Structures are given as C-alpha cells and as structure tokens.
Image: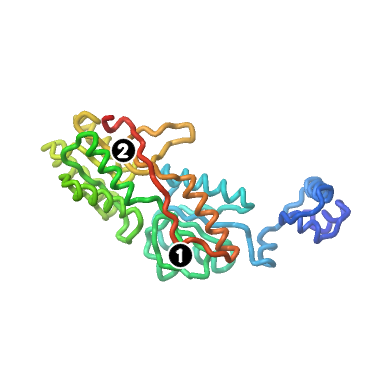
Amino acid sequence: MSTIKEVAKRAGVSVGTVSKVINNIAVKPKTKQAVELAIKELNYEPNIYARGLKVNRTHTVALIIPTVWNPFYGELAFHIERYLREKQYKMILCNSEGDYVTELAYFTMAKQNQVDGIITVTYSDIESYISNNIPLISIDRFFNDNIPYVSSDNFSGGALAAKHLDDVGCQSVCFIGHGSKKDNATRNRRKGFVDYCERHQKSYLIFDDQGHHETFQRNLELFLKKEIIETSTIDGIFAVTDDYAFQVIDYVTRNGKRIPEDVQIIGFDGIKSSATDEIKITTICQPIEEIAKMSVNGVIALINKREVSHEVLLPVQLFQGKTTKG
C-alpha cells in the first residue's frame, strides 16, 4: 500500500502539501492536479481514521433512525447522506429498531471521537446517557434546552388535517395514533387535530395506542370494526403517519367500505416508494429534504463549535390525494 510520502515524491511536493489537498485546503491548481494524479497513479487511500486521531476529527456523522423499512426514514436518510457528502462528510447509518442499547453504542462512538457528530430520530429512554459535549441534532424530539432539534410544524399539520376533513364534509372524525410513551414532537399532530375540532365544535374520537406493534394492530382492527364496519360512526380519519393510513385503508376496504365514498382518510408524512413515485393518498407533507438540510447544517455547525438555533420548525403542506373528496 502506498504512503503519503510516496505520493509527495511522485507529485514533487511536500508531505504537508499532499495533506492540504486531501483535507480540501486551497493550493495552486497545478499543484492540486499533480497531487491528485499521483494519488490516482499510486492508488493511495488516505486513512481518515488515523488522520482523525491527529486532528480529533473523522469527518463522519452517525445517523440513528428507527428503520429504513419506513419510506419516510429511507428518504430522510437519502437526503442527509447527500447533504453530508456535499460537506465532505461520510454517514454511518444505524437502524436502531427502537433498541436503546444499539443507540447508546453510537453515542459511545461519538464520545470516543470515532464519529464527529450524531443526527438522531429516537423515541427511546436515553436522556440520561446524552452528553451535552456530543454534537447532536435531534429530529422530532425535544430532549433539553442544550440539544437542538429540527421538526415539522406538527401542531399546524394536525389542525390542517382536521380542517380538511371538515371542509370535505365529514361529520364525525377520528385521530388514529401509535407511538412511544416518551414525549416527542409528533404528539403535536394529535394536539393540533383536537384543538381544531374543539374550537369548531367538531365531533371526534381518539384512538391512540402506545403498546407493542402486534397489540396496536389488534386493537386498531377492533376499534375500526366497531366504529366503522359495524356502526358507521366515523366518516373521516386522520392517521398520525401515512403508514398507519395505509393500514386503515387496507382493513376497511377488505371489510366492504369504499374510500372516499364511505370513509375519507388523510395521513401525515407525504411518503413515496421511490423518487419517481407519486403520492397516492391525501396527506400532510413534511419537507423531508429541508429537514435533512437543516439537520446537516446544524450538526456540522456544532462540530465546528458554532451556535445553532435551539428549535427549527418547518412548515407542512396539504396534498390532495384520492382518499378524500375534493
């Protein structure tokens, strides 16, 4: 394996100049071209981790998300990796599956300078393990006044969903949610929904289960069977995520209900299965790319010891799909 000294000799420059090129520090264009050519000819691979020990940097950021199986998290990870790459950073992806032990391993890596910072979407009970010395950006969850977080305007999104169901003629609406017992910004979707219904004297029900996934699935189907299939009590549903909206759609259509004729449904996220796919349901769209951009800008600012806004709240938009009348 070639060394940095051999690269310097081939390019006819000093080792320090080679180091500057590797670290994107400005040098004369001809010098940069000569060093890059030498690196290519010698197939030299800089040891970023060894270099990181010297400068206390690895130019890597860990992204902790619950799972890439969810299209929202997959798209978020795509954009975060792209923006990090533009900043000359690499991304380490962690699918935590809600396991706090897995998440803590990445916080330990940050403490040991194996990664420079962390961007996280977590609903685990990890507050006591988070050090304020770790450059950390939280998405959709408030930890404390020292940890910046980036979030969509979930409260306005919940209110927008309720208003849309009202506008399209729903008489009795319902919120369907499922999530962590730990408080997080997505809870504001329910709060915004309820706030609109109460201010406009709109009849509503709440199904908000915090049990395991299997329990949630069973309880949700029992609730839908009673309130929609058997009694037709509800004619409008706001699901806290698009994923849950699709689950509701699957169950009620399998049991003879038509959408949107019998039941109108709106989700939250604006997910697509691919970059060329179209959003299929009525939903409150999160600005996923902007969330990624602000998170990357924030964590790099923290890495460089610069101050960032404690809270970044981004606007959401309603997308009219085929699951509500319009």
Q: Residue at x 17, y 45 (%)?
A: 202
For marks 2 and 1, the one nearer the N-term is: 1
Horizontal side, residue 186 vs residue 205: left or right: right
**Colour scheme of the picture:** rainbow
Residue tagged by mark 1? Answer: 147
Residue tagged by mark 2? Answer: 246
- Residue 261, horizontal then vertical, whole percent: 21, 28
Q: CA distance from mark 2 to mark 1?
A: 34 Å
Which of pointers 2 and 1 indicates the residue nearer the eye?
A: 1
Q: Which sits in the foreground, 248 or 323?
A: 323
Q: Quadrant of the N terminus?
A: bottom right
Q: Please, what secondary structure does the residue beneath circle 1 have?
A: loop
Q: Amino acid at mark 1?
A: Ile
| Local crowd size for mark 2, using a 10 Å CA cut-off: few (<14), some (14–19), many (≥20) | some
- Compared with residue 58, is residue 164 higher up or lower down, i.e. above or below? above
Given the current orientation, which residue lies at the most extreme left position?
A: 231
The circle on residue 304 is none
Q: Please, what secondary structure does the residue beneath circle 2 have?
A: helix
- Compared with residue 105, is residue 74 higher up or lower down, i.e. above or below? above
- Residue 307, horizontal then vertical, whole percent: 54, 64
Q: Residue at x 39, y 34 (%)?
A: 279
